[in-house]
Amino acid sequence: MPVKSLQDMRADALAIFQSGLAAVAPDPAIRAHCRRDGDRLHVGSKVYELSRYEKIRIIGTGKAAAEMARTLEALLEDRAEDGLVTVKYDHLAPLRNVRLIEAGHPVPDANGCDGAQQILAMARESGPRDLVFCLISGGGSALLPLPDQGLTLADKQAASRVLLSCGASIHEMNTIRKHLSAIKGGRLAAAVHPADLCTLILSDVVGDDLDIIASGPTVPDPGTFQDAMAIVDHYGIRDRLPERVIHHLRRGVAGEIPESPKASAACFARTQNLIVGSNRQCVQAARKEAEARGYHTLILSSLMEGETRDVARVHGAMGREILATGHPAPVPACLISGGETTVTLKGGGRGGRNQEFALSAALDIAGAKNIVILSGGTDGTDGPTDAAGAIADGHTTSRARSCGMDPRRHLVENDAYPLFERLGDLLLTGPTNTNVMDLRLVLAAVA
């Protein structure tokens, strides 16, 4: 039976995570779906005859948008005359003709609002003989904030904070965001019409629902104002949201504000939306690397959702089961999951869902020999911190206590960052310039 030391497993976990990241980097992701053949650009199953267009523009938003634009500029060579994308601060890349605007995430700021206004204006300048490429990646919803008439940026910022803290899923948050926006929920596609529109997407949404990724600026919106209000009521946050936000949603429900564009809208007849990278690709690449390192692998799901602490305890329990019985995979085993969990904030500490996952799992595997659990965000940023996540093992909680820290108190206070920082177990990648949600690993082996 193969033997792996705890140090080997920790090193393996980091390498497996990096392999998952590499598989969803913007350049290989785009080039896997797009190729240039003379004056013909193949994008998925569609071919664009570049010579027939008077002007070609690149617009977009998201944490990976700069690197995506860099690859697309290289493919288009001299044909992309101008463009603009909004990115999270420090998520940059050298570009020729496409301008970058850095903006706030996860809470939108004035820079994002200014960038969204400029992108919308550029879209409206496009004519019937133009081609517009739109690049969308995770974080795009916060980075493309353009409040609808009667709302302010402060209203949207406050709404984002409430939605982030109440435990709402990304699907639920973006359903509301689309109905507070002048650019999301298909409205950007309506602005580009009658030009041709091709949107390339790195998905950060469980299930890769096009209308949810970055709040679907270029796809039909199946949601309604009624759906948005139902989510507000489900979480009981009417009194926490700005009065203007509730008034706006009520007006929409009453039919006083036009609904977002639906599938029958004319603009979508000339629109292509293509996912070029997803969590599933990240998970599959991690599996390949784990197998190359001698692990028996099992993908639990790339669609994992739920309260972070609960999902973490399940992962920890499965690690203990492997050591006890060899199920659901024989040792050395590597369980892999993707998706995105949520944290209902109750404390005032510092951390993010991946650090909280690692801490909760550490409590569940405390004392276990040769179990390593890693949880990391593929964008390199976990919550409002500079860490992507954290790594834990059966000794994490005892090491924390020897440093004078109470792991359970840190979990209750949503304060995982200081604990893992003290232990040297933060997962620090810096900006990765991609974003396909999270990657979680459970490694179990015989000592």
Image (cartoon, grey):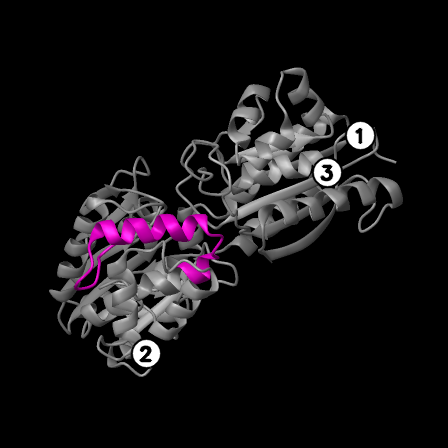
Helix, strand or loop for disc 1: loop
Q: Which residue is mark 2?
A: 262
Locate residue 279, reporting x and y percent: 53, 53
Residue 411 appearing in the image: yes
Q: CA distance from mark 2 to mark 3?
A: 46 Å
Q: Which residue is mark 3?
A: 364
Q: In this rendering, is residue 349 above or below 433?
A: above
Q: CA distance from mark 1 to mark 3?
A: 12 Å
Residue 138 appearing in the image: no
Locate residue 374, reporting x and y percent: 62, 37
Three-letter amino acid code at disc 1? Lys
The dot on residue 369 is 1
- Counting every numbered tag in the picture gives 3
Question: For this rendering, which residue is in front, 149 or 266?
Answer: 149
Q: Residue furthest bottom?
A: 264
The answer to whether the residues at label 2 and label 3 have Cβ atoms under 8 Å apart is no
Helix, strand or loop for disc 3: helix
Residue drawn where x is 61% and y is 21% of the image: 405
Indicate the quadrant containing the N terminus: top left, top right, bottom left or bottom right.
top right
The answer to whether the residues at label 1 and label 3 have Cβ atoms under 8 Å apart is no
The magenta stretch is: 144-173
